[in-house]
């Protein structure tokens, strides 16, 4: 199905904003510059987004793959499904820009607390929702205990990955990954706590 002119303009603005944010940072990128680079008038941009923060939130959501439904593996192998879920990388074609832009986002969010709060909620909500659905599904199947504290469980699953992704970025050109077996270790620790023992 062909996209409408409005949809095309919308995507042009998102792509221009991402490129500029990655190159210059969020503070140094103006709506005027985004309009110039995208070829979309500033008046049209403001019809889609009320301000730069709103545009930035949508651009970042696209960048991290929030437009893609996160798969929930269901092979019957609890450990393998959890490892596959933890290893999933959304929108790999956007990974390079994600790595470039995230230091700018963290710096901007530290100075703009409301933006930071909105961004964390938007970035993490889809991931948390999928993990909660997976936990509930496996509890209903009798694979996970019923006494799980969901907030603690989500923290156990996501905390180590966030630590690696934020504090141990891979050097450009390097193939080495910090804690390459981390997803397996997280899954095993989680299941040791919450899996129903096999009889």
Image (cartoon, rainbow, N blue to C red):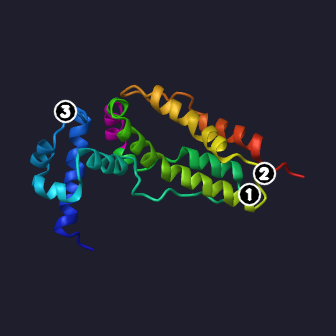
On screen, 53 above or below 185? below
Residue 9 placement: quadrant: bottom left
Marks 1 and 3, how far apart at CA: 48 Å
State which quarter of the image contains the N terminus: bottom left
CB contact under 8 Å: marks 1 and 2:
yes
Which residue is located at x 53 percent, y 58 percent?
71
Marks 1 and 2, how far apart at CA: 6 Å
**Apparent side of residue 55 relative to residue 77 in the rendered image (left or right):** left
How far across and down, in percent of the image, does residue 158 sit?
57, 40
**Which label was assigned to residue 145?**
2
Which residue is located at x 47 percent, y 59 percent?
69
CB contact under 8 Å: marks 1 and 3:
no
Q: Name the residue under label 1.
A: 139
Q: Name the residue under label 3.
A: 28
Secondary structure category for the residue under label 1: helix
Which residue is located at x 84 percent, y 48 percent?
197
Main SS of the magenta part reads helix
């Amino acid at each position: 199905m062909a996209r409408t002119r409005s949809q095309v303009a919308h995507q042009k603005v998102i792509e221009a904003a991402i490129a500029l944010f990655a190159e210059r940072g969020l503070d140094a990128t103006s709506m005027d510059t985004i309009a110039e680079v995208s070829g979309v008038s500033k008046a049209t941009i403001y019809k889609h987004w009320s301000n730069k923060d709103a545009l930035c939130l949508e651009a970042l959501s696209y960048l991290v793959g929030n437009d893609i439904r996160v798969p929930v593996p269901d092979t019957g192998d609890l450990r393998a499904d959890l490892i596959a879920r933890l290893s999933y990388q959304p929108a790999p074609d956007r990974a390079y820009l994600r790595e470039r832009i995230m230091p700018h986002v963290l710096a901007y969010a530290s100075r703009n607390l409301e933006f930071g709060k909105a961004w964390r909620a938007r970035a993490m909500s889809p991931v948390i929702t999928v993990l909660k659905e997976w936990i509930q599904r496996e509890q209903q199947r009798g694979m996970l205990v019923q006494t799980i504290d969901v907030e603690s469980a989500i923290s156990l699953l996501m905390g180590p990955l966030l630590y690696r992704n934020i504090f141990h970025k891979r050097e450009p050109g390097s193939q080495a990954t910090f804690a390459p077996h981390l997803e397996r270790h997280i899954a095993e620790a989680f299941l040791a706590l919450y899996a129903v023992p096999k009889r």
